[in-house]
């Protein structure tokens, strides 16, 4: 008896499917460990937080780095997630030749409401495995910012982060790639701020 297995895709195969028109223009997918995952629709609170976070980060960072929103990053061989926010090193071509890879990433941020479990588990392990040093989850369910740093691999082979810090909406945090820049979280969370 033969056992059925799912087809896993490389990043190149995933791009080829897109080139062939496999995905519709409004479809939202990302490639995670070779699997094509449909991204959940964004709610109003998610959209507002994303808009506010982009605005604040661009004001703070200026020309020191590039702020990307819901754009792909390439992780080794079989993953192309689309984090809500990526702060990446500047490049003269603005990543026209290739999406950012782990060595380009300064900070990744996911905004989590319905995706909280996915962002805390699947995305966290994926980013830690790729060596992304700093990863934040703007947790709209519990109204806090979860800051993860120092990726590691456990003795059992799973990936995670050694450090986790929780901040509340009334607090301020220094941006990991730029410790001289501080983000006022009250300007980011949805609500009357």
Image: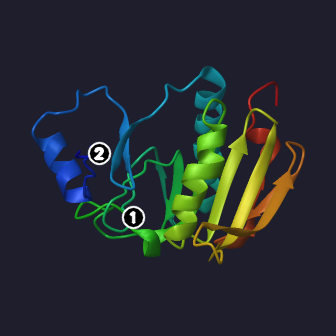
Describe residue 178's horizontal placement relative to residue 76 as left or right: right
Q: Is residue 95 above or below residue 13?
A: below
Task: Answer with mark 1 or mark 2, whichever residue precedes in sequence.
Answer: 2
Mark 2 secondary-structure assignment = loop
| Residue drawn where x is 32% and y is 60% of the image | 78
Which residue position holds label 2?
Answer: 6
Q: Nearer the viewer, residue 73 or 123?
A: 123
Q: Nearer the viewer, residue 116 or 46?
A: 116
Determine the residue located farthest toward the left in the rendered image: 20
Q: Position of residue 23 (x, y in %)?
A: 22, 32
Number of numbered discs visible in the structure rendering: 2
Q: Is residue 70 above or below residue 123?
A: above
Mark 2 Cα-neighbour bin, 10 Å: few <14, some 14–19, many ≥20: few
Q: Which mark identifies residue 8?
A: none
Whether residue 64 is visible: no
Q: Which mark identifies residue 75?
A: 1
User: CB of mark 1 within 8 Å of CB of mark 2?
Assistant: no
Q: Nearer the viewer, residue 56 or 153?
A: 153
Question: Which corner quadrant holds the C terminus?
Answer: top right
| Residue drawn where x is 58% and y is 45% of the image | 54
Mark 1 secondary-structure assignment = loop
Query: In terms of image quadrants, where is residue 61?
Result: bottom right
Mark 1 Cα-neighbour bin, 10 Å: few <14, some 14–19, many ≥20: many
């Amino acid at each position: 008896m033969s056992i059925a297995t799912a087809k896993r895709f490389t990043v190149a195969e995933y791009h080829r499917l897109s080139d062939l028109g496999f995905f519709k223009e409004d479809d939202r997918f990302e490639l995670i460990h070779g699997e094509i995952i449909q991204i959940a629709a964004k709610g109003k609170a998610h959209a507002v937080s994303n808009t506010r976070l982009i605005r604040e980060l661009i004001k703070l960072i200026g020309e020191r780095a590039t702020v990307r929103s819901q754009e792909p990053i390439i992780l080794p061989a079989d993953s192309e997630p689309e984090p809500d926010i990526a702060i990446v090193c500047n490049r003269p071509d603005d990543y026209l030749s290739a999406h950012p890879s782990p060595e380009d990433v300064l900070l990744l941020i996911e905004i989590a409401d319905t995706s909280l479990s996915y962002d805390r588990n699947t995305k966290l392990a994926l980013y830690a495995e790729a060596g992304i040093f700093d990863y934040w989850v703007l947790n709209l369910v519990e109204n806090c910012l979860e800051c993860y740093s120092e990726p590691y691999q456990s003795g059992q082979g799973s990936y995670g982060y050694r450090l986790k810090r929780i901040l509340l909406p009334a607090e301020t945090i220094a941006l990991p790639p730029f410790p001289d820049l501080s983000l006022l979280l009250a300007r980011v969370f949805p609500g009357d701020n």
